[in-house]
Amino acid sequence: QVQLVESGGGLVQPGGSLRLSCAASRSIFSIYTIRWYRQAPGKQRELVAGIFSGGSPNYADSVKGRFTISRDNAKNTVYLQMNSLKPEDTAVYYCNAQLGPNVYWGQGTQVTVSS
């Protein structure tokens, strides 16, 4: 079993930045596919960014050029750097780790973009 814990959410003004972190209870990020999802009120959960073991990151069109996903295997942590934030980025952000049939989710962290 793996526990994922997100942190770094909060309230930020439009145009601001936040960095989300996702810490795992054991070393998995070097072999697992890691994804960040978000879910806004009344909307379905959507994929924001993903990074594959040994592969290049990929992003939803809505965040390309503004968000960056990265990982630090030594710290068992994955990050989502979010710049130029917009009100429509407001959501609960979830970290997801998958290897084959093994899928783990964090509890989510709230991001609110508002003036």
Image (cartoon, helix red, strand yellow):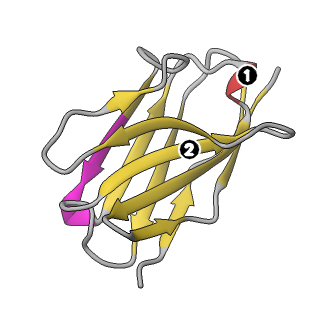
Closer to the camera in the image, 45 or 12: 45
- Of helix, strand and loop, which one carries label 1? helix
- Which residue extends farthest right? 42
Q: Which mark is on residue 37?
A: 2
Q: Which mark is on residue 26?
A: none
Answer above or below: position of 55 versus 100. above
Single out the mark in the foreground, 2 or 1: 2
Q: Quadrant of the N terminus?
A: bottom left
Which quadrant of the structure image shows residue 37? Answer: top right
Residue that numbered label 1 is attached to: 88
Residue 75 locus on image (x, y percent): 26, 64
Residue 93 lies left or right of residue 81; in this view the side is right
Residue 15 locus on image (x, y percent): 62, 15
Residue 46 lies left or right of residue 99; in this view the side is right
What residue sits 51% from the left and 21% below the top?
A: 63
What span is colored magenta in the figure? 69-75
Which quadrant of the structure image shows residue 10? Answer: top right
Q: Quadrant of the C terminus?
A: top right
Residue 12 lies left or right of residue 96; in this view the side is right
Residue 54 locus on image (x, y percent): 13, 46
